[in-house]
């Protein structure tokens, strides 16, 4: 169901990483519903992605799945070049894939640290850098958009590698925005709150301490609908955000007002 005018993303060629995750699917469906052409990246098997694309009812020329592990620089670069082969040009790259490995900092393994930073920060960098290079080559004043989190600025307990990755992503976004502004490339981020699907929902359902803390942390009083993340991204993909760069669009139900009483 479109929120903005049905064709507000017509002519926009968009790549989204992690697009078959819980929030990613909602975002991808909404981008397609607003007339974008889309490459959806993830690491899920081809047949699973094929079923999802078929279920959207979108014609094959408007949406393609490209499987690639974006933590690997060769695969990340190849993802962007295969995206260009399909879309011909790239107007927006959404660096959306991410993971969380919850646990106390004193028990955080080297592996959990490395894998969190590898996907959330390095993977986002690799895709953003390749996408921006192509935009420069093609002379496109495109957009790079990162999916960060409200915890980029909040030391929320027991997810420290994750908060570090999103904090780093914020400075990656600002640094790229500063350097690429002269080429007309806008770089921004969204910072969602505690979303009712995906990683936060999994913690909400399995960790009583997390749930107790999270229930108190949302001033609006309910978990974030994933559609609200998609709508923020539609705005950032659209021409309406053309004068924004180097900004984080906070859309978190007031979570960043934490700590609550
Ligand atoms: N769920 C929340 O409450 C919440 C809140 C704020 C921000 N976010 C951010 O939103 C994004 C999506 O979160 P989600 O909750 O939908 O998580 P999710 O786990 O449902 O989705 C993440 C997707 O990334 C994919 N992925 C994993 N490794 C990959 C790789 N190497 N290359 C490409 N894709 C890979 C996964 O297969 C999965 O489909 C993340 O960046 C997350 O940090 C989520």
Image (spheres, grey):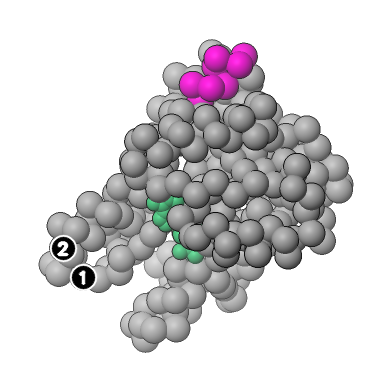
Instruction: Identify the residue at image location x=65%, y=26%.
Output: 89
Answer above or below: position of 52 versus 242.
below
Image quarter of residue 239: top right
**Nearest-to-viewer mark from 1 and 2:** 2
Q: Residue at x 63, y 68 (%)?
A: 225
Measuring from the top left, give residue 205's x and y in whole percent: 45, 83
Query: In front here: 102 or 31?
Result: 31
Quickly name the residue at label 2: 109
| Residue stretch rendered in magenta on the structure | 132-139
| Image position of 119 with respect to 256: above or below | above
Relative placement, left or right, of 54 versus 106 is right
Quick one: 70 or 74, which is closer to the camera? 74
Residue found at x 67% / y 43%: 38
Outermost residue on the front side: it is 47
Query: Mark 1 vs mark 2: which is more N-terminal?
Result: 1
Q: Is 3 in the magenta?
A: no
Q: Label 2 crowding class (10 Å Cα cut-off): few <14, some 14-19, many 20+?
A: few
Q: Secondary structure at mark 2?
A: loop
* Cα distance between the residues tagged 1 and 2: 10 Å
The residue that disc 1 covers is 104
Percent of width and height locating residue 187: 53, 31
Q: Position of residue 172 (x, y in %)?
A: 39, 34
Q: Are marks 1 and 2 in contact (CB under 8 Å)?
A: no
Secondary structure under tag 1 reads loop
Percent across and percent down for residue 245 are 56, 30
Q: Is residue 89 left or right of residue 249?
A: right
Disc 1 packing (10 Å; few <14; some 14–19; many ≥20)? few
């Amino acid at each position: 169901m479109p929120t903005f005018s049905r064709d507000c993303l017509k002519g926009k060629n968009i790549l989204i990483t992690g697009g078959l995750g819980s929030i990613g699917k909602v975002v991808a469906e909404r981008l397609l519903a607003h007339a974008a052409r889309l490459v959806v990246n993830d690491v899920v098997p081809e047949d699973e992605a094929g079923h999802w694309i078929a279920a959207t009812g979108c014609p094959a020329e408007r949406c393609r799945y490209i499987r690639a592990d974006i933590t690997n620089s060769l695969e990340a670069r190849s993802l962007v070049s295969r995206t260009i082969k399909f879309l011909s040009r790239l107007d927006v790259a959404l660096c959306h894939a991410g993971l969380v490995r919850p646990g106390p900092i004193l028990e955080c393994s080297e592996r959990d640290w490395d894998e969190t930073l590898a996907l959330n920060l390095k993977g986002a960098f690799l895709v953003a850098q390749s996408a921006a290079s192509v935009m420069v080559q093609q002379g496109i004043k495109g957009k790079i958009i990162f999916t960060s989190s409200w915890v980029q600025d909040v030391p929320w307990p027991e997810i420290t590698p994750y908060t570090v990755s999103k904090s780093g992503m914020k400075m990656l976004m600002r640094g790229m925005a500063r350097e690429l502004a002269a080429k007309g490339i806008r770089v921004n981020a969204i910072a969602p709150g505690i979303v009712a699907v995906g990683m936060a929902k999994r913690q909400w359902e399995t960790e009583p301490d997390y749930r107790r803390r999270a229930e108190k942390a949302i001033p609006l009083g309910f978990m974030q609908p994933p559609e609200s993340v998609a709508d923020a991204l539609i705005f950032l993909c659209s021409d309406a955000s053309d004068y924004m760069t180097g900004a984080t669009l906070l859309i978190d139900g007031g979570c960043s007002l934490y700590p609550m009483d």
